[in-house]
Amino acid sequence: MNQKEGEVMLGVRRAGGGAGRPDGGFTLLEGMVVVAILAGATLAAFALLFAGTREAETDIPDTELTSVALTTIDTIARELRSAGNISVSSDGSSITFQVPVEAGAGGVVSGTAIRWGAKFGLTEQAGASITYAFVPNTAPGGGEDQLSEAALRVNLNVNTELSPDTSDTYVMGGLRRSACGRQLMLGGTWIAQVGAAGSRGGDVDGDGQGDPIFVYSATDKTVTVTLWYLRIAGSDRVPILKRFRAVVRLMNM
């Protein structure tokens, strides 16, 4: 770089150049204007970056919710595909079944019959059962954890409700898998149900029909699993109510 190029980039006057504009350079006033413009552009860029970051943070809970829900549905569906001896509670909040097991007996088939039992990890137990059941969260003051539309001041199911209102109350919880004397919680703590213990499966979306988690059809040889997720997301406290559903076709029925 020669001296003249340096003077153009830095806006430096030649010594003894007087108050006039240097060849190809900037006056002090023009330099200040350029700095002001650059500063404004930088602030605008930071503002856009901050807005984008905030929006991303708001979207993260929804993304997390969807990931947890899909993983839970897939886990249950994969296990149910090979299930047999299925029974569902009257309110659809739990399902009990068996799966083919070896249990050290030389294969999952005994003669012409499937050897039924339960699995938990690498543990197998012939004759045992697996149960998935909705378990409500415990509220800080005791009792079941609940979220009400009245408290949230929003109608969560306005898009499906026959008579829109803000009077619905949801019991919040997760699913518990029990087998071989062990238990595992899955599905997060954001699964919503309507109804007291023993009568879950109430109308979540306000369409006039019940919304049990598990529905078994011996005729169709299917189990329908429906999970309603409700979570308050982001700094704006935006309620999110989403349904995730899988219809599982039973291979061994």
Image (cartoon, rainbow, N blue to C red):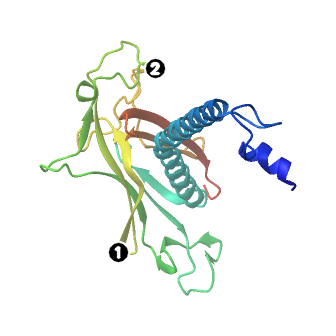
104 over 93 or under it: above or below: below
How many residues crowd around disc 2 within 10 Å: few (fewer than 14), some, or many (20 or more)? few
71 over 172 or under it: above or below: below
- Amino acid type of the residue tagged 1 in the rendering: Gly
Q: Quadrant of the C terminus?
A: bottom right
**Residue 149 visible in this rendered orientation of the protein:** yes
Which residue shows up at 78% across the image and 46% down it? 7
Q: Position of residue 221 (x, y in %)?
A: 59, 46
Q: Residue furthest top?
A: 163
Q: Position of residue 99 (x, y in %)?
A: 54, 66
In this rendering, position of residue 177 left or right of residue 142 = right
Query: So how many labels did they put on this image?
Result: 2
In this rendering, position of residue 154 left or right of residue 112 = left
In which quadrant of the rendered view does residue 220 lie? top right
Using the image as rendered, state which of residue 60 and residue 155 is in the foreground: 60
Q: Position of residue 5 (x, y in %)?
A: 84, 48
* Residue bearing mark 1: 181
How many residues crowd around disc 1 within 10 Å: few (fewer than 14), some, or many (20 or more)? few
